[in-house]
Image (cartoon, coloured by chain):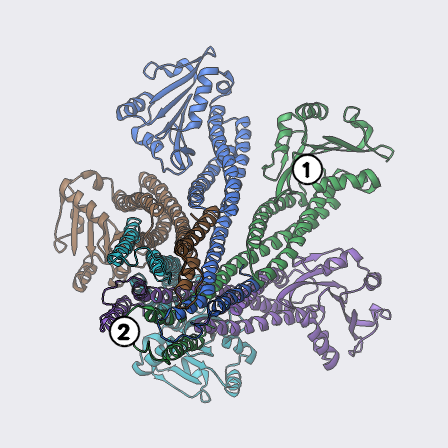
Chain colours: A cyan, B brown, C purple, D blue, E green
Amino acid sequence: MITVIAIAKDGSIVEPKLDEISFEDYRLIWIDCYDPKDEELYKLSKKIGISVSDLQIGLDEQEIPRVEEDEDFYLIIYKAPLFEEDITTTSLGIYIKNNLLLTIHSDKIKAIGRLHKLISTKKPRIVFERGIGFLLYHILNEITRSYSRILMNLEDELEELEDKLLAGYDREVMEKILGLRKTLVYFHKSLIANRDVLVLLKRKYLPITTKEDRENFEDLYYDTLQLIDMSATYREVLTSMMDITLSLENIKMNQIMKILTMVTTIFAVPMWITGIYGMNFSYLPLANNPQGFWLVMALMVVIIMIFVYIFRRSGWI
Amino acid sequence: MITVIAIAKDGSIVEPKLDEISFEDYRLIWIDCYDPKDEELYKLSKKIGISVSDLQIGLDEQEIPRVEEDEDFYLIIYKAPLFEEDITTTSLGIYIKNNLLLTIHSDKIKAIGRLHKLISTKKPRIVFERGIGFLLYHILNEITRSYSRILMNLEDELEELEDKLLAGYDREVMEKILGLRKTLVYFHKSLIANRDVLVLLKRKYLPITTKEDRENFEDLYYDTLQLIDMSATYREVLTSMMDITLSLENIKMNQIMKILTMVTTIFAVPMWITGIYGMNFSYLPLANNPQGFWLVMALMVVIIMIFVYIFRRSGWI
Amino acid sequence: MITVIAIAKDGSIVEPKLDEISFEDYRLIWIDCYDPKDEELYKLSKKIGISVSDLQIGLDEQEIPRVEEDEDFYLIIYKAPLFEEDITTTSLGIYIKNNLLLTIHSDKIKAIGRLHKLISTKKPRIVFERGIGFLLYHILNEITRSYSRILMNLEDELEELEDKLLAGYDREVMEKILGLRKTLVYFHKSLIANRDVLVLLKRKYLPITTKEDRENFEDLYYDTLQLIDMSATYREVLTSMMDITLSLENIKMNQIMKILTMVTTIFAVPMWITGIYGMNFSYLPLANNPQGFWLVMALMVVIIMIFVYIFRRSGWI
Amino acid sequence: MITVIAIAKDGSIVEPKLDEISFEDYRLIWIDCYDPKDEELYKLSKKIGISVSDLQIGLDEQEIPRVEEDEDFYLIIYKAPLFEEDITTTSLGIYIKNNLLLTIHSDKIKAIGRLHKLISTKKPRIVFERGIGFLLYHILNEITRSYSRILMNLEDELEELEDKLLAGYDREVMEKILGLRKTLVYFHKSLIANRDVLVLLKRKYLPITTKEDRENFEDLYYDTLQLIDMSATYREVLTSMMDITLSLENIKMNQIMKILTMVTTIFAVPMWITGIYGMNFSYLPLANNPQGFWLVMALMVVIIMIFVYIFRRSGWI
Amino acid sequence: MITVIAIAKDGSIVEPKLDEISFEDYRLIWIDCYDPKDEELYKLSKKIGISVSDLQIGLDEQEIPRVEEDEDFYLIIYKAPLFEEDITTTSLGIYIKNNLLLTIHSDKIKAIGRLHKLISTKKPRIVFERGIGFLLYHILNEITRSYSRILMNLEDELEELEDKLLAGYDREVMEKILGLRKTLVYFHKSLIANRDVLVLLKRKYLPITTKEDRENFEDLYYDTLQLIDMSATYREVLTSMMDITLSLENIKMNQIMKILTMVTTIFAVPMWITGIYGMNFSYLPLANNPQGFWLVMALMVVIIMIFVYIFRRSGWI
């Protein structure tokens, strides 16, 4: 799907069709291309003069974030979070050529959608008027805020998990931890790669960015550092939680086994005694004594009490 | 809440209202702004000429420690310990502009409170007289001493935990370890970030610091290194303790299972014998023999003694 | 086995015998030598003027990837994946001398085979026409795509494993994980070593590569980085899975032990009671009471229900 | 406690009182100050002209090893092993000012004591005659030999532990491992910090050291590297031992559980059969048959033998 | 023990006694000194003019590999594998002074022995004729091949261990893994230290080495890199194996416990029923019914079958 937003020479924000665009008519054009069909990609390539094979780099979900300076365009690969079953990340290709900024991606990226919607409904001139570097900053900023939002939620989830863990722990908590760890592994790697892109952008690398843009990228750089720090901290906390759960499970197991052992031990001798008096010998001591039953009962109760006392003294009960 | 302490031209220490300050009347002004309401922040921004968005950076609890040199002010972000349910850390923003030092934070920081109280009650000229770099040093020093105090307590807790662990270990110890590890994760990250700030401050970076200030920052730098070292050591010790507890739990489990297995094994054959003699056959060997009961009893006791002997020889008892 | 493919001066692609080659007759010659016998190696050495001991370096499966500049030839050692029982890697030696490119390897490398087949069947001039650097790029590219293909499959296997793990986990899953971890260990090391080779090739090191070749190597370099990143991520995910499985096993064990303990505990007292009433005393209370049996039965059922209630309240059932 | 040893102008070694010293009378003075009272510290400070606050740095047990060049003295902080309940480390402050070397420490350091005793009893001129750098070398060397001695003992303990571990493992071994790991954590950190001090000393940093001294420090540097290497190796070996013990415990547990399961399983059916024949039915098959008892006994023995055979075939016995 | 091999001016290889040597008579002398007695060391020291304390550095088994340039000799410390109970490493001191190469070591080093034997039996001129650098290369090469040989064996052992592990795992496997891990820890450290020595030797450091020697050292350097790589890979594989075994043990334990729980659960109710009918009440329902026995038997069998069905459906059997 290809959508176009542009600012005309007169400052009005319009959404022309791709076919109808002539680049000179606009001050700035943002083309967003999401999961394009082959013919769409071909058409786009022809229109903007970037080869299909170059465009396909931006569609590869695994591409490494970087800034590439080609002959007549810049290519920025950036990692964005992806909300699917598990939260993972995908690569986004950003091509800048003259007054054109093209974002291309094979997965739906929420941050792009949000910014696009904002511009097409509120038509804020400001995003477009300050030039292509400022638009780029807005896109990257929106993505960074996506990470930030997810990590904030994650902190709440962690707190909740910890409470659940100590209260009494169950399978679902483990599965949750597994999911969170995977998310953090992907996030950590993506954020570190994005940081390297931002380092380049904040130093006066691209002629398309103004000094003000670079200051914005610097802020974004610190935000990303902060997110990296958060994700590292959360990972360590998760690891601690895993270790603790293993120990807690062991403690529980010990308690279960103690109960089993106590029950078995306490009744072992009394059961043997009942067994003895259940034997069909013609002569059994005390068997015909009218007090015999009560004597043996008393003996068994005493034995049970002795064992209960021993276990209590050993701290098992 | 905004509180102001200033030293007047005549050397007296006063606490003016924010509205009444004119900066030229004082040699040095320290404004502390804790969890400000929106209108307070706005008023402050207007008074001191630093934009609200710049001030909000100082209020973000997750901000990365750093030194930023802006056009007409310096911003230092520093991590301070935070005493809440668990001991974590928060960010503190310090703005320096001419003869004004502004500390801004969204969480209550004990070190700031302590220093503030000290100045407002004892009115010690010394902190203020040596200039703004010396005041900055005093604030950072007080924060570093907060870390130091907590880590000292932590060492005692560790010793105590270890004793508890070896004596007989329980759930609360595990929860304690989980809490301590989390605290150390946060501390380690914060201290390393603070160290980077101090590296900048001890090298002649800011024109606001004198040579003497920089020597003070160097001392602070070594104190922070020492704290980092301590926190790293404590983390390793905690990890060792976790590993050990897992093994100790396993050893205990083994002992519990040994008891269970012994009891079950020792009584298995005697119980079978009583079962055999409990069967209602018209003919049971020895059943009518008057010595029968004693013979079978003797057999059972011998079997029990053999098993006890076997277990003792195997080192189970 | 030695196979030769060459492009003649007239641009036709031919497959001459090794013995019949005179190097001046061809524009470019690719000799592939797989697991050569001693006489083959000797013959090859004599023909191309590279000593047998130098050629044997390329046959060592453990050789470290690198670029070596010898007096009259270049030697590139590169790691390629090897499909055997477990997926490991092997070393490939590439010798470049004038218009000759020699690949030598003691294990069968699929990527080489695939490229060789492609050239000998489709006879594409393009691979040969752009010079020896371009042929080298094609060989390394084919190898990199082998890694890529295996890692893609691996991701699917990982997803599958995770489902199996959570659904109910078994020995085969563990063995699978062990195998995958080993594969990733070998891949990670090989890819990092290959990356170092590509760093050299992409910088203008070898006079045999054109500017275009170096750009191709740069693309290959980024592809390799991407693969390294993937393999690192997969390893972390595998480690998480291992940790989770240990915990899941423990949870299962706890549940098994709970059942055992419950069964033992619930029936302990009722069994004792039946034992008591099985004793052969002449006097047993209630024994002759016609309601005696039902009273005792009721008592036992009540006891069982009390224990069931206790276990249910404790959350065991 | 303050003790003084000095070499007079005439080469004789004397032990003057602190109060009576005039620095010009001696060629070289070594003052050792151990856990000084406040008044001692004050007196010392006045005598040697180094401020109390500077001296207190040397008394802080946690101080980071380093070399500090102050206006009129040098301060070297060095870590020494401390023999208490567990073997940890403490900081030692060494102040060098003209012909005075002051060692100050709040814990008793054996190496210092040993060197002091050696000098006061054997009165070896050599230590003193070659200047203050040589005395410094001797002190640091004695400390390094303390580490060395402890680590050598540790190796023996490790060997012993390993034997115990494989022979049959017990609580005390675990506690021993915990202690050793803690010792190694402290040693590793201390030795790395000391190494950094020696790097400075072996490069021509201090004007107080001669070329020969620096060569001595270089030897000490290599000795320290060797100790770091040893401690790292021992830590890895300890970690391996911990991992192994966990597995060995599990193996033992499995064996215990196998016994329990076998006993329970083997007797389950025979016990049921005795139960069946213990039931008080007026009609029991075979009950009145004179061979009945022997038939049922034979059945039970056969069942037991079948189970024993099954378990043996499964490799449990 | 001191053995001498030398090449005379006329090119013949001889084995003179140490006492009879005059250094000018030979082109090159190799003295090997293994575990010397004090008088031997003293004699050697006097003969070759290197102090005893310098020679003792070479005898220290823990010495760090390095190259030392002394006034009139070179000292190279190198780590060699040592075949004792466990395979560890020892230090070897190599002293080079004019036309003398002295190897000194307190443990028996196989590689030295092998080279010595080769020279004394085959008397190959080549080793000696190319100068002292070439002899040094031969010694280091022989040591490197020792490592290589051991690591190759280790790979086979690893394969074997893995098979044993999956087939059914036992104590001896664990002890084997512990041994292998220790060996790899020592090897890894030694190889890394040796690599640093080779880095120095391959760069034109020593005037005693020719350009050809340095190329040989470069080859040795790559061989050592390869060995480091192998040892790192093996260690990771061992760690994976350890983790897997822990999980496999747990799986086995679960299966054992399942059997125990099933047996106990299946027979709990039937045993209770036999207990009930074993009670000596004058009135037992069905007791006098001739079908009573068969009805109760049928009930018990049905209960057993229900439980077996439940366990089967739960996947326990």
Can marks 2 and 1 be said to lie on one chain? Answer: yes
Q: Position of residue A36 (x, y in %)?
A: 48, 84
Frontmost residue, A295 versus A143: A295
E33 vs B93: above or below: above
Tag on residue E108?
1
Tag on residue E283?
2
Q: Position of residue B35 (x, y in %)?
A: 20, 59
B23 vs E18: above or below: below
Residue C261 at least partly seen: yes
Frontmost residue, D208 versus A87: A87
Q: Which of the marked residues, 2 or 1, is nearer the chain's N terminus?
A: 1
Say which element carries label 2. Answer: loop
Q: Position of residue D122 (x, y in %)?
A: 48, 15
Q: Where is residue D225 in the image (x, y as percent from the top left)?
A: 53, 39
Residue lying at 31% horizontally and 22% vertically, measured from the top left: D44
Residue lying at 40% horizontally and 50% vertically, measured from the top left: B248
Residue A194 at least partly seen: no
Question: Where does the N terminus of chain D fall, quadrant-wise?
Answer: top left
E67 with respect to D142 (left or right): right
Residue type (three-letter) at the residue carrying disc 2: Tyr
Calculate the distance from the C-alpha at mark 2 to the C-alpha at mark 1: 89 Å
Residue lying at 64% horizontally and 55% vertically, measured from the top left: E157
